[in-house]
Amino acid sequence: MTDASIPRPRKTSRSGRKVQQTKAEAHVFETSEDAASDVAMTIAALIRKKAHQGDPVVLGLPTGSTPVGVYRELIRMHNQEGLDFSNCFTFNLDEYCPIQPDALQSYHRWMDENFFNAVNIPQEQRRIPRGDFPRHEGDIPRQEVADECAKYERKIDDLGLDLVLLGIGRSGHIGFNEPGSPIDSGTRLVTLDSVTRKDAAEDFFGEEHVPLHAITMGVGTILKAHTIIVLALGEHKADIVRQALEGPRTDRVVASFLQGNVKAEFILDEAAASELTANKTPWLVGPVSWTSSLTRKAVLWLSFQLNRPLLELEDVHFREHGLHELLGNHGSAESLCQSVFNDMMATICPHPAGLEPKDVLVLSPHPDDDVISMGGTLIHLVADGHRVHVAYMTSGNVAVFDFEVLRFADFVAEYCTEFGIDPNRARDRTDMVRESLRKKRAGQVDDPDVQFIKALIRKTEAKRAAGSLGIPEERLHFLNMPFYQTGSAKKRDLSPKDVTIVQNLLRELRPQQVYVAGELSDPHGTHRMCALAIYQALDELAKSGLKPDVWLYRGAWQEWEPHEIEQAVPMSPSDVRHKREAIFKHQSQKDYAMYPGHDPREFWQRAQERNRHTAEIYKALGLPAYHALEAFVRRRSER
């Protein structure tokens, strides 16, 4: 989506708050958009200052999902505010090796598509490490690579680096400086860490296709820059951000080399900062303003720290753990803990939409998010007589293995032959599909026929899974949102057409209750894109009086923290089995998913263990014991 098509508030000054007690300067912003906008303003201010002085500006630039919001805001400034990039020289941090510059996953191509083609940086002023080295006898020509790296390093030294923008990998890398990288390292060939390769698997259609090597600007090179900004977004970065900012300075977490560096600053969204002491337990850092939400968080934390149920906490426990202020506000531990206990009891909800029949809409980004994330709740909703609709927002076709396509194509050919349904045409089509897959290079986008078959596999699985929970086919909606239809992990920008599709469904069904995937911390994932489209549709329809009750669920990646939970739906052992069987209907995702992320467990295992863990938490707090619980929070703007 272009910045003009969906307006957002203009930021004119830094709105982030400085984090206390970190070993490098860090600022936290409420959303990833705010964080990206702040970084873009910093870069724009530097460009304008240098232009006013008649000097060039030299930028070190990253790729990947993290900086996309920065580049989009810079492009907006170029188009709408006349920000001139003609005085910019750029050095990209890294590139895979070996890889051709026009390959789908190449950072040369990525930079053109996401930034360079939309601004006026002269071609001769853009530099990206070369990755297109031919293999000699199966190996990279290392001396040739070393010579190119030395040349790249000399060019950087000649111009200097005014500002380097960095992401941070889950291994703690900056650039592709993996664990063990020396602090004085220069531009060089590196072997990619297994965590890095897992994280890149989605772009390459499988980890086995991710290159083993890359060329990266070195740590020593980065540290020469006048300004260093590390941008980290999302819950999946929270632990490594904590290690980089609060842990020891070590080459096991290369980003920790920035500790104590006055030129370096971390820019974080709330999710990425969630594990920092000042965010997770702010009462241990200094005085706080005790809101009801923070009070609940602190009391639950104390209960977990002491392994005591809520109603067994005493005044002395609060005093010994720095929470004496709470006693002053509430009089005694007994009254305080009883209040929090009552709040947590009120979250337990066996009838999530009540007992009066309602129209309920579950919006599922992929064809299996509904059963993975809230299969037990769907069972309750159907049993309570509600009219449950499920809308699958994308086809999920990029997550289907090629062998599944061949299996289904062979089945259809045999089926048509057996029943005399134009068997020759079926065989011809199967042969075409087989040939297309045979010719496909690693990481190449499927042809349209293969994409269609993969989408059809996911669609039929979704029908079987929802049907097993009692949701009839006529209440299933397959939206095929345009932003997803690229055949690759990289998606289009959200467009007004995407929003309109959701609006039309909401207008048609007029549900009283809506469930949305709430994993917004991933700045450019499918779940986030779907949620943004839903929120824009809901906000627009609210003007005409359509204001359903909106609940957020979590998918296969994270769960809500206990203090955040506002609705917990109990599940019996039979509910858990029923949910698991529904997940099993998604056979293309069974045993091993194409994009499992950093969790090796299957999706059903993650969901089952997560639901049981939530129940164990409630039990440990002294609340009623259940076999499993599914957790939800209200949409933030409504809370």
Image (cartoon, grey):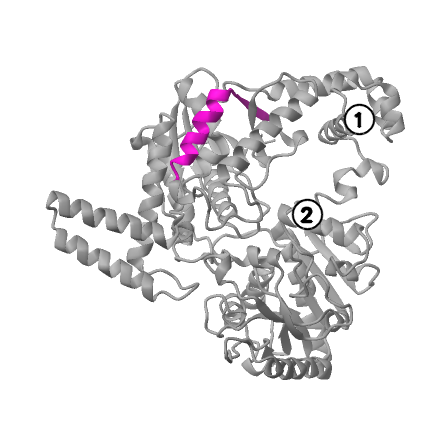
Tell me, yes or no, whether the two marked residues, 2 and 1, touch with CB atoms within 8 Å.
no
Q: Position of residue 251 (x, y in %)?
A: 76, 61
- Is residue 29 visible in the rendered image? The answer is no
User: Is 585 within the magenta?
Assistant: yes
Q: Amino acid at mark 1?
A: Leu
Q: Is residue 44 left or right of residue 137?
A: right
User: Is 193 within the magenta?
Assistant: no
> What are the residue bounds of the magenta stretch?
566-586
Helix, strand or loop at mark 1: helix
- Give the residue drawn at x 56%, y 55%: 198
Is the residue marked by circle 2 packed among few (<14), some (14-19), or many (20+) residues within 10 Å?
Answer: many
The image shows a total of numbered marks equal to 2
Residue 306: mark in rendering:
1
Nearest the eye: 86 or 351: 351
- Is residue 198 visible in the rendered image? The answer is yes
Residue for badge 2: 238
Classify the position of the C terminus by image quarter.
Answer: top right
- Give the residue drawn at x 66%, y 26%: 617
For residue 190, above or below residue 629: below
For residue 457, above or below residue 342: below
Residue furthest out toward the front: 137
Q: Position of residue 148 (x, y in %)?
A: 62, 82
Label located before the other in sequence (2 or 1): 2
Q: Position of residue 471 (x, y in %)?
A: 35, 28
Q: Amino acid at mark 2?
A: Ala
Nearest the eye: 544 or 71: 71
Helix, strand or loop at mark 2: helix
- Give the residue drawn at x 50%, y 43%: 531
Distance between mark 2 and mark 1 Cα atoms: 24 Å
Q: Position of residue 534 (x, y in %)?
A: 47, 41
Of labels 2 and 1, the one closer to you = 1
